[in-house]
Image: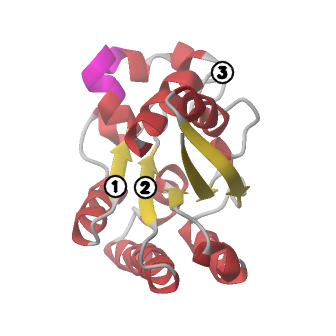
Amino acid sequence: MNEIKLITIGGSNSVIKGGYIDNLTRTANNLGININQHHNLAVGNTTSGYGLYQLKKHQELIKDTDVLIIEYALNDEFIYSLHTWDIRHWSRLYEWIIRYAKTINPEILIYSVILSTRNGDYTQKIPPIAAYINYLSEWYDCECLDINMILAKQLGSSTVKSKNFYMPNDSAHYNNPVATSLIGKISAEHLT
């Protein structure tokens, strides 16, 4: 069985009990990947700037980890996608997260997980934050999992736009257990 050490930074979707991270761990174990150590440094209602702070604060953990999951696209989209200056500022933060982690641990695998709201930009156009995450991931040889795009291709866009796919009266958090299980499964399969 393969063993990996995992660090997660991100917003509330990465913290919710029974959310996609719990399902990722369970699915990974079923696929023969033992996540033997997981440091979930995610904090709800935060952006990439806080993720960089978390990595700097926990530098020793980065030295001894295999995989870093970054999940801020949903929160960053609300804050940074409105103006060109904000996008430039955000892209420097996000790039520095990747560069910092790779400087501390050149062997680390980085996975950017892109989540979105039910009525997010992806329903009408390509969201700027998602586009930049894809670009930066490609540039730095990282993995990018655009979850809503993957699910829309597999299940149809009406599924990821459905209010049943999200928590009741909450278009920013995925419904547990169906949606979070799907997201956890997709994320875990990319670790193999």
Type of residue at label 3? Asn
Say which of marks 3 and 1 sits in front. 1
In contact (CB < 8 Å): disc 1 and disc 2: yes
Q: Which residues are magenta?
A: 151-158
Q: Earlier in the sequence, mark 3 or mark 2?
A: 2
- Is disc 3 surrounded by few (<14), some (14 to 19) or many (20+) residues within 10 Å? some
Q: Is residue 157 magenta?
A: yes
Residue at mark 3: 176
State the mark number for residue 111: 2
Secondary element under disc 3, as helix, strand or loop, is loop
Residue sitting at the far right: 17
Disc 1 marks which residue?
143
Residue in the foreground of this view, choosing between 40 and 146: 40
Indicate whether residue 134 is drawn in magenta. Answer: no
Residue 1 position in % (x across, y down): 54, 39
Residue 80, x across and y down, in percent:
45, 66
- Image point 43% across, 55% down: which residue? 111
Amino acid found under the numbered disc labelled 2: Tyr
